[in-house]
Amino acid sequence: MNLRGWAAHEVAVERLRSSYAAIPAGAPVRLAKKTSNLFRPRAAADGPGLDVSGLDGVIAIDAVARTADVQGMCTYEDLVDATLPHGLVPKVVPQLRTITLGGAVTGLGIESTSFRSGLPHESVLEMDVFTGGGEVVTCRPGPDGEHGDLFDAFPNSYGSLGYATRLRIELEQVPAYVALRHLRFDDPGLLAKSIAEIARSRAHEGTPVDGLDGVAFGPGEYYLTLATWTDAPGPTSDYTGQQVYYRSLQQRETDLLTMYDYLWRWDTDWFWCSGAFGLQHPTVRRLWPRRWRRSDVYHKLIGLDRRIGFADWLDRRQGRPLRERVIQDVEVPVERLPDFLEWFDEAVGMRPVWLCPCVALRSWPTYPLEPGLLYVNVGFWGTVHVGPEAPQAPRNRAIEQRVHELGGHKSLYSDAFYDRATFDRLYDGDNLAVVKGRYDPQDRLTSLYDKAVKRH
């Protein structure tokens, strides 16, 4: 047992309690942190925030039991750095280095292992949550678990029910390397059938599949990447240098990465969004310091542009229509994936998009995917020109409608435009209100609807 780690954790929790007590009643409660992976703007807030300094580390790792006790503000980058020397990683490691464990649980996360391991919250065994009542409660899953109502409603609650200070999670054993196969498809129907079959059998042509995701580059050009954990060494690719990972899907049929580089293969270029900064041009890439080829750096640059409005100024100067940000992740049942991709091509026209199969291992009320049903996460991040004459967020509103017509759900890390009744129906608002009332009786924490839609 790491006694020093536990002692330091208790000190940090007491600091959090003190900072909460210092926030005046009626003032908004927010984390006092400099980084975020959210894409929805929020109203400016004055006054102090919650002091989460000291809650950003790994408390202890049990390599025999394959578990880790981790603080809520610990990034997956730091978590992997602590577990990988033991040959262990979290069962689901979201794609971006600075996503925190607490953030991935309260705000959802996903990666290529999600077709077999679900979302990050499904490998949480227990967690300590700092509630709106100013208490830290230890909760465990299910109706018979201690504070099971809070545990079950916590995923997708985005801080409206409290903040995770400690999580005990399951880990899985991994080897040193990951072998990749990139399969091209011309037909979205065959693509969807192949996803379903590979997810069911966890194999393809006799070879095990441990990770599964893909990219739709455009109509008639779809790729699935099949990842197989392996100890067999060989020449490995490096996509932190001059090469760009997503382009390799079109350029080669097989590849080999170290486990570490596989986990962060998308982070170096923020999937493909580094192209907005010219970073995929060979000359710019050579000049751009490698330490700045990270998703959190790009996120800060986007935030800077949002504050100064440079992109909008440039569009106006060049006579182009203004842009609508279309930054979303949605889940649709695998059999409806062809319908969504066809509609998306016509209605939005943004490419490429990410494809990541996932399954809910059991029911989670605040993000009610049907347990055992295979969904495909479709991620798209960019802008489209709409002009000032268009209604507010026409593409985003259309996406919301189409996703739910197809029996899917939309993540809430970015802009949302639902009316209150629709939002409560889709995200179990009645139950969420009951749980919030129990653990936040003074209603000090901002509700999920106010966070996700009203941007408070």
Image: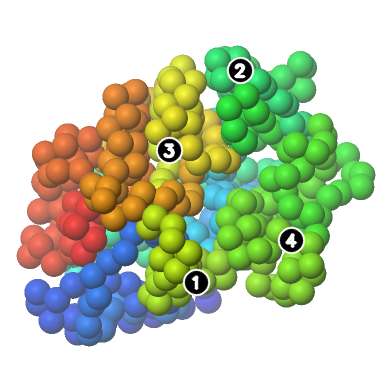
Q: Give the amino acid at mark 4.
A: His
Q: Earlier in the sequence, mark 1 or mark 4?
A: 4
Instruction: Look at mark 2 in the image and give the residue it sits on.
Output: 187
Element on which disc 3 rests: loop
Q: Earlier in the sequence, mark 1 or mark 2?
A: 2
Horizontally, is 120 left or right of 126 in the view? right
**Who's the residue at 22% across and 84% down the image?**
47
Q: Residues within 10 Å of mark 1 (few under 14, many from 20)?
A: some
Q: Mark 4 and mark 3: span between their CA atoms?
A: 26 Å
Q: Give the amino acid at mark 3.
A: Val
Q: Residues within 10 Å of mark 4 (few under 14, many from 20)?
A: few
> Which numbered disc, 1 or 2, marks the residue closer to the eye?
2
Q: Mark 1 and mark 2: span between their CA atoms?
A: 38 Å
The relative height of residue 430 versus residue 300 in the rendered view (above or below) is above
Instruction: Look at mark 3 in the image and give the residue it sits on.
Output: 348
Pointer 1 and pointer 4: residues touching (CB < 8 Å)? no
> Which numbered disc, 1 or 4, marks the residue closer to the eye?
4
